[in-house]
């Protein structure tokens, strides 16, 4: 760890004694491979370690003042040590190998969380993040929403594009989010979900999530909401009549 600390201090042009005074640490494409040395930078408020070939989260437990953290484009397959970051507000973990969202339960100050382009297939352990406003889970393997987002009472912007959600009933699980106003199932930067190709996709989503003002890339007008409601009610009446007739 000492030689990595020496490397970092030399790279930054600071003495090791001054390391604890730094508030920002920024490395991109430097191939550090391990991050345990960051425990010496206890006063950091912003940490950026992008595309470093790092596979293990370590050294984070001493960064009590950290508010923003970028750990994207690495090889993390597990979240470790982030439960000590009680002041973290923005966390970017995209483009790793994560399969679960657990390990963030105590990061209750989080406002923005990006975990896009991982291998996540189950959303859990996020219910305690009552301050979280922006969540990006695009480009994962999520098929079911279930109760994974329950408790996130401040969530207003949710990106679920390029996952494997193919059943309309999963959309119903989002109507328990009282502040959700932007929802993305189809994003040109990532891709879409199977439900986006189903007949009456936007009608169904707008009817069941009436608080949305943007769906995918489209701003939603009152006329669009009224049209969705009218169309959905007509179809419901039609199918009810068919059932009674049969």
Image: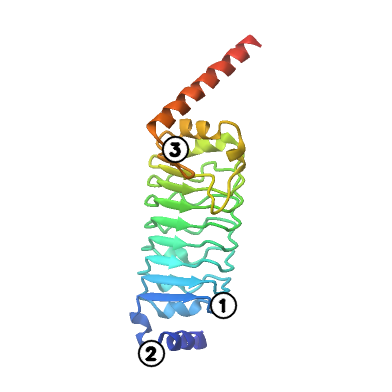
Residue 176 image label: 3
Is 155 left, or right, of 234 in this rendering? left
Report how far apart the C-alphas of labels 1 and 3 lie in the structure: 41 Å
Badge 3 marks a residue whose secondary structure is helix
Q: Report the front residue among 225 and 71.
A: 225
**Horizontal and vertical percent position of residue 100:** 57, 56
Say whether residue 145 is visible.
yes
User: Which is more N-terminal, label 2 or label 1?
Assistant: 2
The answer to whether mark 3 and mark 2 are in CB contact below 8 A is no
Residue at the outermost top position:
245
**Horizontal and vertical percent position of residue 44:** 37, 74
Residue 185 image label: none
**Where does label 1 land, which residue?**
33
User: Which is more N-terminal, label 2 or label 3?
Assistant: 2
Report how far apart the C-alphas of labels 3 and 2 lie in the structure: 52 Å
Is 165 left, or right, of 111 in this rendering? right
Badge 2 marks a residue whose secondary structure is loop
- Residue drawn at x 51%, y 76% is 35
Is 189 left, or right, of 127 in this rendering? right
**Horizontal and vertical percent position of residue 149:** 48, 45
Q: Could you classify mark 1 by the number of other residues whose Cα lies within 10 Å: few (under 14), some (14-19), or many (20 or more)? A: some
Say whether residue 105 is visible.
no
**Where does label 2 land, which residue?**
15
User: Which is more N-terminal, label 3 or label 1?
Assistant: 1
Is residue 171 positioned above or below 76 on the image? above
Is residue 43 positioned above or below 210 on the image? below
Report how far apart the C-alphas of labels 1 and 2 lie in the structure: 22 Å
């Amino acid at each position: 760890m000492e030689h990595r600390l020496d490397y970092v201090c030399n790279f930054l042009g600071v003495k090791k004694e001054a390391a604890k005074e730094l508030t920002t640490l920024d490395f991109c494409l430097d191939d550090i491979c391990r991050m345990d040395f960051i425990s010496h930078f206890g006063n950091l408020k912003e940490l950026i370690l992008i595309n470093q070939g790092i596979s293990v989260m370590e050294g984070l437990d001493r960064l009590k003042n950290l508010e923003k953290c970028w750990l994207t484009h690495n090889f993390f397959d597990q979240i470790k040590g982030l439960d000590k970051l009680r002041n973290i507000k923005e966390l970017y973990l995209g483009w790793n190998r994560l399969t679960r969202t657990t390990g963030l339960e105590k990061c209750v100050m989080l406002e923005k969380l990006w975990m896009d382009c991982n291998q996540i297939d189950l959303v859990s352990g996020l219910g305690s993040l009552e301050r979280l406003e922006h969540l990006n889970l695009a480009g994962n393997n999520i098929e079911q929403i279930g109760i994974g987002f329950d408790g996130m009472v401040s969530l207003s912007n949710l990106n679920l594009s390029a996952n494997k959600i193919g059943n309309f009933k999963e959309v119903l699980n989002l109507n328990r989010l009282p502040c959700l106003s932007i929802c993305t199932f189809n994003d040109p930067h990532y891709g879409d979900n199977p439900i986006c190709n189903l007949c009456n996709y936007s009608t169904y989503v707008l009817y069941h999530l009436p608080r949305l003002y943007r769906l995918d890339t489209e701003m939603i007008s009152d006329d669009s909401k009224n049209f969705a409601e009218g169309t959905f009610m007509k179809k419901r009446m039609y199918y009810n009549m068919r059932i009674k007739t049969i």
